[in-house]
Each structure stands twice: as structure tokens, then as C-alpha cells.
Image (cartoon, rainbow, N blue to C red):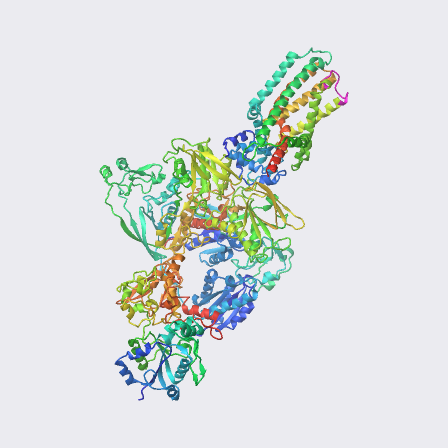
Amino acid sequence: MSYLPKPVLVIGGGIAGIQAALDLADQGIQVYLVEKTPSIGGKMMQLDKTFPTLDCSACILTPKMVAVARHPNIKLLTYSEVIEVTGSAGNFNVKILKKPRYVDEEKCIGCGICFNKCPSKVPDEFNLGMSQRRAIYVPFPQAVPLKATIDKEHCIYFTKQRCRVCEKVCPTKAINYEQKPETIELNVASIVVATGYQLIDPTLAAQYGYGKYQNVYISLEFERLLSSTGPTGGEIVRRSDNKHPKNIAFIQCVCSRDVKINPNCSAFCCMASVKHSILAKEHLPNVDCTIFYMDLRAFGKGYQEFYNRAMREFGVKFMRGKPAKIEEEPETKNLIITYEDTFTGLKKTMTFDMVVLAVGVKPIYPEALKLPLSEDGYVQLKNQYLDPVLTMIDGVYTVGVAAGAKDIPDSVVQSGNAAIKASILAGGAQK
Amino acid sequence: MQKPKIALYWCAGCGGCEEAVVDLAEKILDVINLVDIVFWPVALDYKVEDVEKLPDGSITASFINGGIRMGEHEHVVKLLRKKSKLVIAYGACSAWGGVPGLANLYDKEEIMKCVYQETPTVDNPSKTMPQVKTEKEVTLELPNFLPRILPLDLVVDVDYYVPGCPPTPDVTWKSIETLLSGNLPPKGSTLGALTKSVCYECALNETKPEKVLIKDFMRPHKVAIDPSKCLLTQNLMCMGPVTRGGCGSLCLKVAMPCTGCFGPLDEVKDYGGKAASYFASILDYMDEKEIEKVLSKFPDFMGVFYRYTLPASRLRGKIKMKGGD
Amino acid sequence: MTYLVPQHPLQLVELGAERFSRCFNCGNCTAICPITKEKASYPRKLIRYSLLGMEDKILSSTDPWLCYYCGECSDQCPRDANPGSFMMSLRRYLTTKYDWTGFSKLMYYSKKAEVIAIIVVAAIVGSIIYLLHGPIVETRVELETFAPYLTTEIGALTVLFVLAGILLSNLYRMYRFVMRDENGNRIRVPLGFMIRDFIRIVPLHFLTQIKIKECKDRQKNWINHLIIFYGYAASFILFVPLLKFTQTNDPFLFVNPLSILGIFSTIALLYGASIAIYGRVKKTQPMWKDSHSTDWMFLILLLLTTITGILTGIFRTFGFPLPTYIMYSLHLMIAAPFLILEVPFAKWSHLAYRPFALYFESLKERYLASKR
Amino acid sequence: MSEELRIGVYVCHCGTNIAGVVNVKDVVEYAKTLPNVVVAKEYVFMCSAPGQQIIKEDIKNFKLNRVVVAACSPSLHEPTFRTATAEGGLNPYLFEMANIREHCSWVHPDEKEVATTKAKLLVKMAVAKASLLEPLSEIKFKVNNTALIIGGGVSGLAAARDLAARGIKTYLIDRSPTLGGRAARLGKLTYTEMKGIDVFKGLIRDVAGNRLIDVYTNTELVSVDGSVGNFKVKLVKNPRYVDAKCNLCGECAKVCPVEVPDEFEFGMSKRKAIYLPFKDAYPRIYVIDMKSCTRCLECVKVCPVGAINLNEKPSELTINVGGIIVAAGYDPYEPKTGEYGYKLSNKVITLFQLERLLDSEGPTKGELIVNGVKPKNIVFVMCVGSLSTTPDAYPYCSRMCCSSTIKNALVLREKYPDTNIYIAYKDVRTYGRGDEQLYMKAGENFVRFAKFKDAPKINIDQKGNLSVTLFEETLQEEITIPTDLVVLVVGMTPPRDIDKVRTTIKIGCGPEGFLREAHLKLRPVETATDGVYLAGAVTGPKNIIESIASGSAAASRTLALLSKEEVAVEPLIAVVNEDICSGCAICVAMCPYGAISLKIIDKNIRVAKVDSALCKGCGTCAAACPSGAMQQYGFKDAQIKAQVIAAMGEV
């Protein structure tokens, strides 16, 4: 074989997509990596540390992100979405909509002058709305590419036809309000879907009062609280009074393992909460952490040991029982949890300063692909055993949480799996 | 043509270095033919005052052996430095402190007490201690005892070193030849020896196995040594690998492990530290307890690793100098 | 050592428990239950006992009788294991276990047996009426002549005492099952306490069923329950012990306070039974979501008894002799199986078991307190 | 050095990570005062594109010949800044990094002044070292684009299949007489109607007869030399005693007088000394187990095609490959005799034995018959050998057992609806896709779960009746379950002889012996040894799907390596000063990578020699070298000493 390989499309710029793209590119395959947000990085970028080694998440991820940007075989298409896919394995015609950033990517140097001057403040998605960004922004400082994007919905120029401050301050004249959406057409051999997940709406588990009680958090919010780049600069403080909590409850299986909301196990929340409790103890040595769980799924390498450490070394309490409800003490905004301690059979209430809900996840799929799904809401697979990443559509592979809730190492392994499958289909030339 | 003038001086040492010069045997006559010895207290009747009278820099080279222990040593070496073009630290004591340097493990008071009171053979019921100045019947002044022993280069600027305890005649001759050749090596060089370690010259080096790892520490007088096999592999703490060669591996030829009298090689700054590091590297245990067990067999850790080099090492010794160190 | 009965949970399925074996033991149900106290660990623990086959643990428990099926647990159960219906089926199961005659078991486990039992009792009553009825006066309503008071009353009271006897013996069996400690050993409480607690607990809870109110949003249910209970009690008193005054040849409607009470009580019964039937059909309340055949039998027989009674009164008042006699015969043929089968063997018995469960629980507490 | 030193110092804010604690301005001002520093600047994210741009421009504008960046850990962004330095036109190894985040701002968040002082010191040290840096160039090697896969289980097969599909010549070796590993022995799988053997057949379809895949069974690893891109591997092929002429007639096995327990059936049935490992074994050739063979020659006499040769000898072969995948699998935990009653009663079996019993091709043709009767009550005891349930048990979770147990329970309930099944568990960890539903289905099918904390006791009475006693944690009560069969759900352990393979290839392992990945999260199929990859359960417990996925992932990484013309290695390796080296050989034993050997330079004069392809730059040899002849590029004694002096002053 000595013909040139065809390109491969990777959809989703989270860790799974990044790894798949890097593997493919290293194999000499041309890769298009499409990401719908302005930067690659995905959910992993929002994490503070990763279990069970407590590696700083951004620190291990950013070199990979930089490698993507640098790799000569990877064409990065951020702020873009796949809108149409036709054709079949080996020969997919893909239409990609490149949304306008209203900033010329060639000219923007990511200096940040524009977002310091922009007058329009918007809740920051990266910090789950716990802080503010401007209408022209970079999602986070290590963004790849480090190019500003104008959020049209909140930009004063686009809503009220005045302002244009960013245009005035930009040192490289990169602002271009006239930018139009662009459609890119590609012909690719195969497609790797690494579109990841979204958290299930925590208000579906109404008994826990998320959104109603200020000091009830979801785990990703807590992750941002822990992070030194988060809205509080790494301080764990309560929404209600900006004070350090003295005790924190972590509730497992919120919106997962619940047949009425989402019957699937979300696989990583147990360990994430164990990690959170350890990190909380590191941040606030006197804080009491209690994890409410049913089965503590410490199944991966080093996970059980991590769990044991949390128990023995950090004194995290593990309470087996699914809390029935949370009520708020109106004056203190403390939270009263009612639960049964299933080891003693006693029904109890306990008061906490802060509650963190380990919310379940559901996959996101590109609509353009019309992937057949199976009963559990995840993509249906053609032959789970012999080809664990192949969807019902030949030439389309899924990886990461989009292919079933999983943790980072399993996602990375799957990415490698999909990469070689896509690579085979692309018929990469051998030297 | 006037012959070059040389001086020889003996500081704190055993006298072996002086012997070593004499050990040149008939070659010493060649030396005398080539140079004028202007100062050599052990052999010639020149006094310090004679040296003082010489013009500065008029001595071509001063060979100084022994470490600097007494105020007198300090005074004379400074004088020789002033009068000499080159100052050569001759022998291990002068270069790094030598065996007497191990006294630096104790402070001045401890040494004095030990020597004048505690040693079993001492009879000193009035517990008299030596004084720098005594004014009883006559006024007597003795050189003061420095807080610790110093290698020569910590007292005066040293141009060259001649290693050995004592330097072998071969080494001494080679260094004299080098000096007389007029083709002087860079300052700070070691004369007469090799840039490689003892192993290089050692006939037993070839008997080493592919991987040198040891399991135990043995003392030479307690084992039957196989003279045809690398001593290290017989669990004897041979300092050969860490010691400068040039001695002709004399000890090893008679199946005694190298004790390190030729001191460190050019790239090594702290002989004992390097020796300990090398020993730790080849000690073939992972278990801490096993390692402890081997280490407990060392009768005198400092004596093994820092036998000749303690005063010149990073450790220096026990005594604190004024102004910190 | 606990002896395990692996078949046990399957019996509960037959008794109407749905999906409870899905339970993954999270304790959400216990925690959400509005009437559980700190130490009362149900439904979770009972489900565990049941699934593992620890039958004696269930037999010695009074907890099933404390549940009024508000459905909170079933609503929030993450596995949708329906603990409420499980508790309901446990009550049925316990009813069959308390009953020593085997009738209860027969009816609860077999719809066929249930229907046959009704038909048999109705037929016996029918044949007795056919054989023993008085002269049939066709010109005017002569109910007293058709069904002589003494015969009817003797029959009714005989049945009443037999049934009461059986029910009491079942209650005694319940006492024997329940009064055991954790290791299954019998426990006894001094007689003085037994009497004092009986007076304190049983009449109050029997007459007011006040515990229902502890359940969530159960005000309406409690009232409906009371309507049925008092309508039933009044009708029962009026038409059994006071039959002498109520079974007359005179027009019944609005003639005396008794008749007014009778009318109100039957209307109350009609209302209560209809609400309950409607509720069960439409499944408006959690407790009505899964109805067992015996629940239907209870309600249908109650409704039919009430309707036939009312119709008898109406026919008598309007002076239709034959319809009155026929309707009255029908009324007796329905009322008899209703009483005979329901009071000691089926759903009706819960009226007795519930207050007694509280009573026994209190005795147990006393015992445990004295041990401490 | 003749050239005048011109150093540029760049201090990173890292958002607020550094600037929140360290007074960056002060540090910059201080840096300007250091010797040879011609420019010092600060920036919010030095690693970002604009940050790097500053460096590149300054190299040109200020004619810099050394670059120092004070930022985060070098493990993170050293490559980033090296590249930037190179793009600015300097040798990338003239760059030095000071870690003022992990080593400073993060550890002194509450002591701002102290942190600032420390940051200055760290910068001073970096500048001191930078002055002594020397230009280095990357070491490059040509890549041999063939691969070796060790282990013919599903992960190895998947890796071979995928590599061959991309045209890579692959050697697949297995020390047993057949491919298939452990998965081939499993019965019905969790999510499909397929069986373990079907997965094996599915994979072998692509492997058997593939001209790019050379399969060597009965073959073991002898030695591995060389390094990434160019390994020289010695193998020994043990004799099979039967050659490819074998037509599977089976006459030999009929006449063979020796019967031994069949390991494929976990000893639950017997095989002969000459045997076919299993029906669909690959290669499908009989094999003689010489350990039990009596050399009676009956088989030789009866073989119609003369395929048997009892005098076959082991043969050695050497292959050259560019990458190695270790897919050595796992061993099931083997309970000690008496542990949970194991081997005390034949009614106590392991989960793997149950899988065989339920397989229609197993020893009982798929009927669950123990002691001649069908058990009615069955108890599964989970976490045997895992989660520290017993003193001998491992601390880790074996991951696949929960759903495997539940699957088997469901298979049993479906096949024998009147059996009562109890699962004694510690934690139900059905984490995988569809597993939670499986768990619920088990509940629906009245599989009963009892939670224990301490290991259940298996009681065997005089009549041989079994019961399981455990303390049910959620009921706080001891229960005893009378049973006819106890299934011990054993965990996965590292393969017994893995240490031999591990030390031959020189890769690390964890405390329990599973091989260690280069990075647990982001490099799960790579090892610290370049060019060596890991697949399947050899890194830790995995189910079949995960094993196959990791096999493919390892193939993907291997392919990424083998697609390259040449590999470049960082030049931060050891170097020998031959003028000093006396050939004392101390370093040779120290090198964990076997990179050092002695070379003869003149008659009997020897000096150490570093194989730059093998050297990982760990520095062990430099520390051990007694004479200071061994130094490490980038970390020479002089450079480190300069840093120490900068920090502590001259001693």
C-alpha cells in the first residue's frame, strides 16, 4: 500500500477526541478535529485534580492540547459544528458549520485587552455561572486556540448596535463584526465521535433542592470551587455567606441509578466524590466530609486504595444510604439531610453547611449523524465484543463518555481503539 | 646558570613524606645536581630567619607536607608562600588533611583532654595542660594549637598537588621532572599521578564480573583474601575505583584493598561523599533492614570513607570556625 | 440462627407485591416515610428480610400494620421497587399467617377459591331463607312475616359470635408471633401493663384510626376511612343487635331517629365505598394503585350489601312486597358472605390487627425497656 | 566559553497561580540584576502562544543565547519552551526552567514574602545553571516497522489484528500451545448471546493465515536488547512434538495411556498427555505435554501421517522489531486449600469453573451437575482474593467480577428457574454500560443479595452439607444460608511468571505486580520504556471488552511509533569522559536499562560506553561513578554545583 491516506474526522475536543486525534495524526493520518465551543479541552479542563493520583488536571491536559495545535497532521476547527453527513464508510461527505467568532483568528494574539475592556458581563460557563466573563472572551486562559470570541447574544454591539469598544482597543485590528458563518465541506474516510456528555438536570431530583437551596452544589461546581483558577481562587466557600463550610455532604447517584431519571451508573462519580472529599480536607483541614453512597464503585486501578486512604488517612466518613430529602434551615442556610444509615437501620437527620450532589450524565451526539441509540440512551454498537467502538454505522466510531459513562483512562484507551480502527479505514500509507 | 631554589617543609604529618623524598635513593643526587635546597629543616640546618632574608619569590618551589595544625605551621607556610613562585602540597596530609585530619571529628578541648589526661599511659596528676605562654621561671612561648587541622590550600594558595600517603618515589620523581621540564601544567593540577582511578592500573580489574554488586562488608584481617580476584567482589571495601591512580596499585598487588591515599580524581569534589555514594550504589539490597545490617559492620564509617580527606571535605569536621562555615 | 425460606418472597408476589425484588437496599424508602421513627427501619429492612427469606423476622414484626400506604416511598424509590405495595402485600401475608383456619390463605392465594367461598356462603344463606322463610304476604309489605325477627337475629348473632371467636383466636396467634425478641424467644409482660396499655391504645386507635393522619396528605383519606368505618359500624349495630327495631313492617323512611341514623349510615357507606371503588379504578391514590382481588371483593361486597339494604328499605317504604322480600333475601345472601369471609379472614380484619399491632408494639417496648 | 553570555529571563504569572502569591514584578527586577541577564520580562501565561512569541522575538532582538523561564513544572511545559527557544533560532537545550509554581507559590500560599524571596532564589539558580548549558542535539534512530506481541489472549489478538490491518508485520507469541488465553474459556458473555470462544473465533479469523502475522506458540521470551524502534528479541520455541501434518484424527489421544487433569477445564475433566488444548484451539494441532508423557511411543505408532516426533528439541530464534506489546493477561486468584472451604468439598468451586460447567462444550456439556446432582441452592461469594477480605487477599478491586457474577446468576435462573441464588457481596460495582440494568434484572429475577463486611464462613458438616454464614451488614444480623454449591468469585492476579518478562523487557510494576503504565490516566497503554506498550489485564483487572479495547489502543500507539521513519530521543543522557574513566565497571551494574557496557579502547584498557538509544537519562550511573567520569548532559556536576552555589553560596 502506498497511496495517500484519506483524512479522518474527529468530533469533540475533549480528552477522548484529543487523544484520538493525536493517535491518528501520529500515525500519519490527516485529522480534522471539530469542537463546537471556542476551545478544545472539554470537561477535563474544568476539573481541578484527577483521581487517584491527584494530578492537576489542566497541567496534564494542556500539553496534549498544545500538541494538537502544533501537530502538522491535525486541522483544528473550533467553534464549529457538523451539520450534515452523507456517504458511507471510507467516503463520508461532511459539512461543517464554522460559526463566526467575529474575531479574525489570523490576527488575534489572545492578548486579552478586549475582554478587559468589554462592558458586557455574562455568567461564565467555564465556572458554571459562578463567575462572570465578558461578551468577548476566551473560555479559559490556557484555551487552544487562544483566540477571542464574541458571544453575539450578549454583545452590546449586536444587541443594541453600539459600543464597539473591543474594536477600538484591539492592537491587531482583529475584530470583524461582519464575519459570516462559513460552511466547510470535507471528504473523510471515517468519523470518530467523541462528543462527551452533559450533566443531567439536577432539579429532576427535586428532593435535594438544587437551585432552591443556595448551598447545594453539583460536583462540577465543587470542582471549580476547588480549582485555583476557579471563581473563588480555590477557596471552598458557601454561596450564601462566603464562609468556609465546617462539614460537607457528598451525595452519590443523583440522577443516576434511578429508573425514573436515568437508570445508568455514571461510573466516575464515586471516585470523583472521594477525590472531592480528600481535596476538601486538604483545603480545609478541619472540615468534616461525609459521603452518602449505596455501592462505592472503586473499580479501577488504584481506586480501592484511594478509597481506603480517604477513609483511613483523611477520616472521610462513608454513610451507606440514599438520602430521602434535603431541607434548609432558613436562618443559617444550613441543610438538613434525612437518611437511613443502612448499617444500623436507624433513620436519622444530619445538618451540613454544604451539600454536593454527584450528578449523573447523559451522552451528547451530533444530530447530523443520526446514530441509532439503544435502550439505555447510549449509542448502539454493532459488535460490542469484537469491535467495541464501532457504531451501527460502518466507519463511525464512538469513544469516551459518548460511548457509555466512563473515567478518563478508559476514555483514553477507547480513543486509541477508535484511532486505529479509523486509521485502518483511512488506509494509511505505509512507508 | 643559577640552579632553581627549592624548599621543603614538614607540617602536621607522620614524617613519611620526608622519608619519601629520601626514598628517591640515588635519584636524590640527580635532584641535588639540578636544584639548590634552601630550606629543609629535617635534613639541613637552615632556619626560618634564613628564609625570611630571601627576596620574595626567589624560591622556585616549596614542597610542603603535612596538614596545618599549629600556629607555627601557618606562619611558616605563609612565609614560604611569599618567598616561592610555586607552592606544592606534597602528600595526602598537605593536600587534604590526611590521617591526622580525622582529629577534626573532635574539638580542641577534647583532643587536649584525651592526649594530656585520658590516655592510659599519661601520668599527669595535676592535670596540667599545655599553654601557649608560660611565665613561671622563664617565659616560654609555644606555637598555638589551631581549632582544627587544615589542608594547605585552605591556608595559602597552592599551585600543585602531589598525592599519596606518602607519595611513591615514582610519583615524586615524575612531579619533579614535570616541574623541571618548564612545561608547567595548569594551576591546581595533580602532579605525577594519573587522571584515572586505581582500577585502571589494577591487574585485578579484569577479573571483575559483568555487574559489580556486593552483598556484605568485610574487613581484610578477618577473611582469607583471594589475591587473584577483584577485592571488591570479595566484599572488601576497596577504594580503588574512587581513588586516583598512579600508585601502581601497590596495595592491591599484595592483596590489600586500596584505602584511598591518592585522593579524589579531578571531577570529584568530596572524596568521602563520592566513596559512600559509590558503595551505596553497588550494595545489592532493596530492603532497608538488610542495608542496616551491612552498615552496622563498619567499625568506623569516617575512617573508611574519609581516611585521608576529612579536613578538605564538605564536612570539614566538628569544630565551628568563627564567622560560621 | 435464622432459618431461611427461599420461597418466601415469591408468596408476596402472589399477594400483590410488585417489583420489590428490584430493591438495592438504599434506605431511601425508610428515610422518606413520614411515620417511621428513628428505630423503625421499614420498608427497607422488611424487604431485605423478605428477599433473603427470613420469614420469622417478618412474622414477629408489627411494622407492616403501621404503614398506611401514603406512597411516598414508591414515588421516590430509585429502583421503582414499589415498597408501598410490598408493605400492603405483607399485611395480606400476615393476615393469612395469623389465621389458623386456612380460609384466609385459600382466599388470598386463589381467586377461584374466593369466588367459590362467596357463592357457597350465599347459597347456604339462600337455602336457609328458602327453607325457613315465613309466609309471603303479597298484598302489602310484611317483611317481619317473611323473615321472622327471632330466626334472623339468632342466625345473625350466632354467626357474629363464631366470627368474633375466630378473629380473637387469630389475634391471639398474632400475639404469639409478635411477642418475641430478636432471637425468637417468647417474651412476657406483666398483666398490669397488658391491661393498662390495652385501655390506653386499642379503643382509641380502633375508634379514631388517628395514625393515618401521620401519613403525608392523608386528611382526606382519613375522613373517608372514618366515613366507611362509622357507616359500617352504625349499620352493623342497627341491623344486627338492634334488628328488632329496624326490621319492621312499617315504612322505614324518616319515621324515627333510628331510621334517620340508618339512612345516614347507609348513605355514608354508599359514598365511602363508591369513592374507594372509583379511586381504585382510577388509581387516584398510591394505596389504590395496586389492588388485590380481595380488595375488590371487600369493596364490591360492601357496596352490594349497602345497595341491596338501601333498595330493601326503598321497596319497603314504597310498598312493593315481592321486590322487598327478594331484595332482602339478596341482601342477606350478600351480607352474610361479606361478614363471614371478611371479618376474620380477609381485609376487614385489619380493623382489629392495626390497633392491636400498636398495642403489642407498646408491650414489646415495655419488655425491652425493662430488660435495659 | 568565548561567546559572551546573554540571558533572557521570563517570569510567568500562570493566571493567579503564581502571581497570586509571588510578587512577579519584584522577581523580574531582581532577575535583571543577575549576571549576564540582558532582559527580564513577565507575562500572564508564558506557555500561551503570545507568551512564547515574546521569547522568540527577544532571542532575535536581544541576541539572546540562553533562555530562562520561571513558571510551572518542567515536566509540563519544558517541551513547550524548548520548542519556542528553537523557533527563536537557538539550540533548544540552551533553555532552562525554574519551577516557581509547584515548588513555590503552591506550597507557600500564605507566605507571600517568603515565596517571593524563594522565587528569586530559584530564578538565580536557573540563571546560574543556564550559564553553563551546552547546545545538544536530539539523537535519532531509524525505526524497524515490525512489532512483537507477547501473549495470545484476546488483547494480544486484537492488537495483532489491528496492526496487521495497517500493514505492520507482527510477531505474536504465546508460551502455551494455543492462542486464546483466558477469554476463550468463558461461557456466555454478559451482553450478547456470544460465548468467550466466539470472541476468540471472531479474532482468530483475522489472525489465522494472515501473512503479516507470524504466530509462535509454545514460545517464550529469552532476552530483549536494543531500544525503541530497534529491539533485538531472542525467543525460544519449545517443542510441540507434533508437526503441522497432524490431521486431527485423534487416534493418538485414544491410545495414550496417561491421563492428567485438563487445565482448560480447570481440572474438572481429564485429558491425555497428547491432546488438543480445546476444540477450536489455534493452531489446531495436537501437542504433547512432556511433563506427563511416559514416552511409551504408542502415539507415534498409531499416527497415520507420522506427525509425531518425540525427539524434537527447543529452538532459538532472534527477531528484530520496532515495538513490543506486552499482553500477558492475568491469572485467576487461586484460593488456598481451606480458604472458603476451597478444595475441602467439591461443592466449592470458583467462578471460572462455573463458567466451564455452564458452557455447552464444557465438561458437563453445559449442565450444572455437582456430585451427580443439580444444586438447588447456590451461593456466590464475591471478592474472594480481592478487597482485602482475607489476609491473603489483594487490596484492589477486580472490576469484572460483579457483573460476571450477576450474569452467571441470571444464566442459572433462566436455565434452572427453581434454583435459589444468593450473592454474598461487599459492594456491587456494576459500573459498566448496561451493568446496572443487569443488576436490576437480577433483582427482578429474585437473585438475592446479602452484604457482608468480613469474609463469609463456609461450613461443611460431617455429611458434607454446605452452608454459608455471614453477618449481613444492612440487617446487622448473622445469617446462615444452607446451600448445595458455593461459587467463589475469585479476582484477577498478575500472571505468575510476569516478573521474568517484566525484567527482561525492563518495565515497572505496581505493588501487586501488575505492570505499570507510563501515566495512569493519559498514557494507559504505554510504559516508561519507550517502544514498549501494554494491553489487556496485565496492567490490572479488565473485562473482555476493555481488554480488546486496550489491545487495539496499544496497537494504535505502536502504530504511531512504527509509522515514523525515525525516532528522536532527548539528548539528556549519560556521557563518559574517557580521559577519566578507568573501566571500573561500577556503572554497568547500576544502569536499570542495560545501556552501559565496557568497551576496549586499547589492548586491555577498558572504558564505559553508553548506548544512547537505551539511556533514559536517569542519572543513576552518574551518581554511582566513583571517579566522576560519568556525567549527564543537562545535569552535569558543574551545572548542578553552580545551582547549589547560587542557592547556598560557596562552601
Residue at point 27%, 51% (across, down): D316
Residue A253 is situated, as x and y percent measured from the top left of the image, at 55, 45
The one of C64 and A63 positioned closer to us in this rendering: C64
How many numbered tags mark residues here? 0
**Residue in the foreground of this view, choosing between D206 and D104:** D104
Residue A232: image location, x then y, percent: 59, 57
**Furthest residue toward left:** D301
Query: Can residue C149 be seen at all in this image of the molecule?
Result: yes
Is B322 drawn above or below residue C152 in the view shown?
Answer: below
Q: Between B254 and D22, which is closer to the camera in this rendering?
A: B254
Q: What's the magenta bit mostly, secondary-structure-wise?
A: loop
Q: Does residue D59 appear in the picture of this structure?
A: no
First to last magenta residue range: C246-257
Based on the picture, tell me whether residue C248 belongs to the magenta stretch: yes
- D464 and C353: which is toward the camera: D464
Say if D88 sits above or below A345 in the image: below
**On the rendered structure, is D353 left or right of C307?**
left
- The picture places residue A41, in percent across and down from the top left corner, at 51, 54
Measuring from the top left, give residue D365's x and y in whole percent.
Answer: 37, 33
Quadrant of residue C329 within the rendered picture: top right
- Taking the magenta stretch, the answer to whether it contains residue D217 is no
- Residue at point 40%, 30% (across, down): D373
Is A272 left or right of D298, judged from the image as shown? Answer: right
Q: Residue furthest front?
A: B125
Is residue A63 shown above or below C91?
A: below
* Picture quarter with the C terminus of chain C: top right
